[in-house]
Image (spheres, helix red, strand yellow):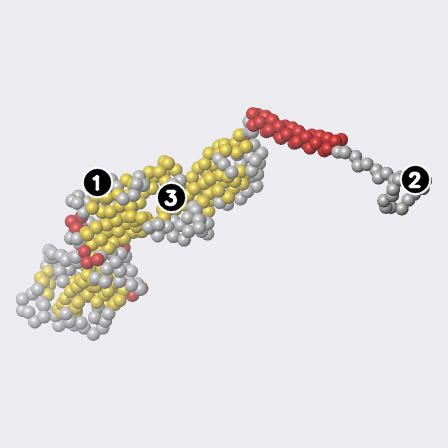
C-alpha cells in the first residue's frame, strides 16, 4: 500500500526572564504563532523584552503598541483514497514529561481509531484513508500543563458519494434512475490536481440481481472511459444510458437512465484507474419496486384478485410496505393486512377499481412507490350468451350420441335370429342306432 508522509516540526523556545524568575519552556509549530506567558505589571505602559537562549539581542520587544506576526502553513500533497497516511510530529529537543497525541479533522482522538498506529516517536500511520479524512490534522504537544497545537492540512481525492444503503426506485416508463459518481476534490484543488495522478482509464459495470432459480447474474460492462481529450464515456450496452454529465464537467462521472424495469435490479460499480495500479471505486446497489396483480390487471366482479408488491426478494426486517387504495375503496373492508406485501381482494367490486399505490418505507422515511391501475368489469352479456350456447350444444351432442347408441342396441336385438329348439322324435317302435335295410 502506498503512503504519503508529512512532517510537523515543533520548535522549542527557551526564554529566560530578565527578572531572574524561573525559565519558561514553550512549544510551537514552525511557521506558526507562539504565545509567550507574561505576568501583569499593573500597567501596559512598560517595555518588555524577550531573549532567545544566551543571545544579547532581544528576540521580541513588546510595548504598549503591541506587535505583528506572519503565519504560514505548508500542506501535504494530495492523497488517493485507500492509501496509508503517514504523519510525524517532530520535536528537535524533548524535555522530560512532554506528551504528544493526534486529533483527526473531526477533532477525534486518534487513540480511539482502530485504523491509527501511533508510535513513541510521535509518528502516526492511518490505514486506508477515505474522503472523511480530508481536513486539518493536529498534533497536540503537552508540557507542564500547557498545550501547543501543530496543524497540517491533508487532502484526500475520492469518488463520491458513498452508498451504504441501496438506491430505491420503481418500475415505470417515467422513472429516472440516477447513478451518482463524481470526483471529490476539496478546494482549493482542481481537476488538474487529479490529473497529476495520471488517470489510465475507467468503467461502469453492472451485475444483475439473480433471477429466480439462478445464483448469480451475468457481469456486464456498461461503459468505458475514453481519455480523449476530452474525457468521454463509450457506451457498450444499449440500455438507454445518459452519459452527458461528463461533457459538462470532468468531475462528474454519473450515469442516468429514463424508464426503469425489473431488469435494472443489481449492483453498479464506477471505477477510475490511475498509474501504479491504483483504483478508486464506488459501488451501489439498485432495488426496483414492482407491483402486479393476478390473475390479470383486469378482473371481473365477484372474482378474487391478488396484488403483490415486491423487490424481487423478501423484504428485510427494517422495510415495510403501505397500500394506498383508490378513494372510493377501503382496506378495512378487505380484511387483509395493509402492511403486507401481498393484498387479497376476496370478491372484487366496482369500488375496488382504480389506482392502487404501494409505498416502500424504512422507519419514517418513504423510499419509493409504485402504482397499478386495476380494472373491475362485469362479465359481458355476449360472454354469457356464448357460454349458454356452448353449453346447450354440448348437451345436444351428448343426447344425440346417447340416442344413436340406444337405437343401435335396439336394432341389434330385433334383427338377431332366434335359436331353434331341439326336436326329439318319439316313435312307436324305437330302434337302436345303426344302419338298417328296408
Residues 156 and 340: in front is: 340
Residues 81 and 265: in front is: 265
Q: Is residue 417 left or right of residue 395?
A: right
Residue at point 60%, 26% (across, down)? 389
Eyeballing the image, is 155 above or below 376? below
Number of labels in the image equals 3
Residue at point 64%, 30% (across, down)? 397
**Whole-percent x and y of residue 416?**
75, 33
**Whole-percent x and y of residue 341?**
49, 45
- Of badges 2 and 3, nearer the viewer stands 2
- Of badges 3 and 1, nearer the viewer stands 3
Eyeballing the image, is 381 above or below 175? above
Label 1, label 2: how many angstroms apart (C-alpha)?
A: 134 Å
**Could you tell me if residue 383 is visible in this image?**
yes
Q: Is residue 43 left or right of residue 422?
A: left
Q: Earlier in the sequence, mark 3 or mark 1?
A: 1
Circle 3 Cα neighbour tier, 10 Å, few/some/many (<14 / 14–19 / ≥20): few
Q: Earlier in the sequence, mark 1 or mark 2?
A: 1
Q: Quadrant of the N terminus?
A: bottom left
Kindly indicate whether the residue at mark 2 contacts the one at mark 1 (C-beta within 8 angstroms): no
Residues 381 and 398: in front is: 398
Residue hosting label 1: 248
Residue hosting label 2: 427
**Whole-percent x and y of residue 420?**
81, 36
For label 3, the SS is helix
In the image, farthest residue toward the right: 428
Residue at point 21%, 50% (across, down)? 201
Residue hosting label 3: 263
Residues 279 and 82: in front is: 279
In the image, farthest residue toward the bottom: 96
Amino acid at each position: 500500500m502506498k503512503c504519503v508522509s508529512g512532517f510537523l516540526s515543533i520548535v522549542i523556545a527557551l526564554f529566560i526572564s530578565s527578572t531572574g524568575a524561573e525559565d519558561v519552556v514553550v512549544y510551537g509549530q514552525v511557521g506558526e504563532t507562539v504565545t509567550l506567558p507574561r505576568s501583569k505589571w499593573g500597567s501596559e505602559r512598560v517595555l518588555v523584552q524577550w531573549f532567545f537562549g544566551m543571545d544579547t539581542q532581544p528576540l521580541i520587544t513588546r510595548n504598549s503598541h503591541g506587535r505583528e506576526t506572519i503565519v504560514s502553513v505548508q500542506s501535504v500533497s494530495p492523497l488517493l483514497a485507500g492509501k496509508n497516511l503517514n504523519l510525524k510530529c517532530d520535536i528537535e529537543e524533548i524535555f522530560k514529561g512532554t506528551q504528544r497525541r493526534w486529533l483527526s479533522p473531526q477533532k477525534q482522538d486518534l487513540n480511539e481509531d482502530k485504523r491509527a498506529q501511533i508510535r513513541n516517536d510521535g509518528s502516526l500511520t492511518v490505514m486506508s484513508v477515505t474522503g472523511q479524512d480530508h481536513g486539518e490534522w493536529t498534533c497536540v504537544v503537552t508540557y507542564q500543563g500547557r498545550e501547543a497545537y501543530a496543524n497540517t492540512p491533508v487532502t484526500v481525492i475520492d469518488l463520491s458519494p458513498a452508498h451504504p444503503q441501496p438506491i430505491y426506485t420503481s418500475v415505470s416508463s417515467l422513472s429516472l434512475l440516477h447513478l451518482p459518481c463524481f470526483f471529490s476534490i476539496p478546494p482549493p484543488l482542481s481537476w488538474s490536481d487529479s490529473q497529476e495522478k495520471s488517470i489510465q482509464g475507467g468503467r461502469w459495470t453492472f451485475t444483475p440481481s439473480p433471477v429466480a432459480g439462478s445464483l448469480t447474474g451475468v457481469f456486464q460492462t456498461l461503459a468505458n472511459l475514453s481519455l480523449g481529450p476530452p474525457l468521454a464515456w463509450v457506451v457498450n450496452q444499449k440500455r438507454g444510458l445518459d452519459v452527458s454529465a461528463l461533457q459538462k464537467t470532468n468531475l462528474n462521472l454519473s450515469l442516468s437512465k429514463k424508464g426503469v424495469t425489473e431488469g435494472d435490479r443489481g449492483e453498479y460499480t464506477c471505477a477510475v484507474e490511475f498509474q501504479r495500479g491504483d483504483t478508486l471505486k464506488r459501488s451501489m446497489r439498485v432495488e426496483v419496486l414492482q407491483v402486479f396483480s393476478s390473475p390479470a390487471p383486469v378482473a371481473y366482479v365477484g372474482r378474487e384478485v391478488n396484488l403483490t408488491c415486491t423487490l424481487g426478494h423478501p423484504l428485510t426486517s427494517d422495510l415495510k410496505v403501505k397500500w394506498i387504495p383508490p378513494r372510493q375503496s377501503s382496506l378495512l373492508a378487505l380484511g387483509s393486512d395493509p402492511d403486507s406485501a401481498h393484498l387479497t381482494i376476496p370478491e372484487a367490486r366496482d369500488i375496488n377499481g382504480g389506482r392502487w399505490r404501494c409505498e416502500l418505507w424504512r422507519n419514517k422515511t418513504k423510499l419509493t412507490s409504485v402504482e397499478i391501475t386495476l380494472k373491475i368489469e362485469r362479465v359481458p352479456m355476449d360472454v354469457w350468451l356464448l357460454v349458454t350456447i356452448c353449453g346447450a350444444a354440448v348437451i345436444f351432442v351428448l343426447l344425440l350420441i346417447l340416442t344413436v347408441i340406444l337405437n343401435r342396441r335396439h336394432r341389434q336385438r330385433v334383427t338377431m335370429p332366434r335359436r331353434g329348439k331341439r326336436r326329439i322324435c318319439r316313435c312307436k317302435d324305437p330302434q337302436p342306432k345303426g344302419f338298417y335295410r328296408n
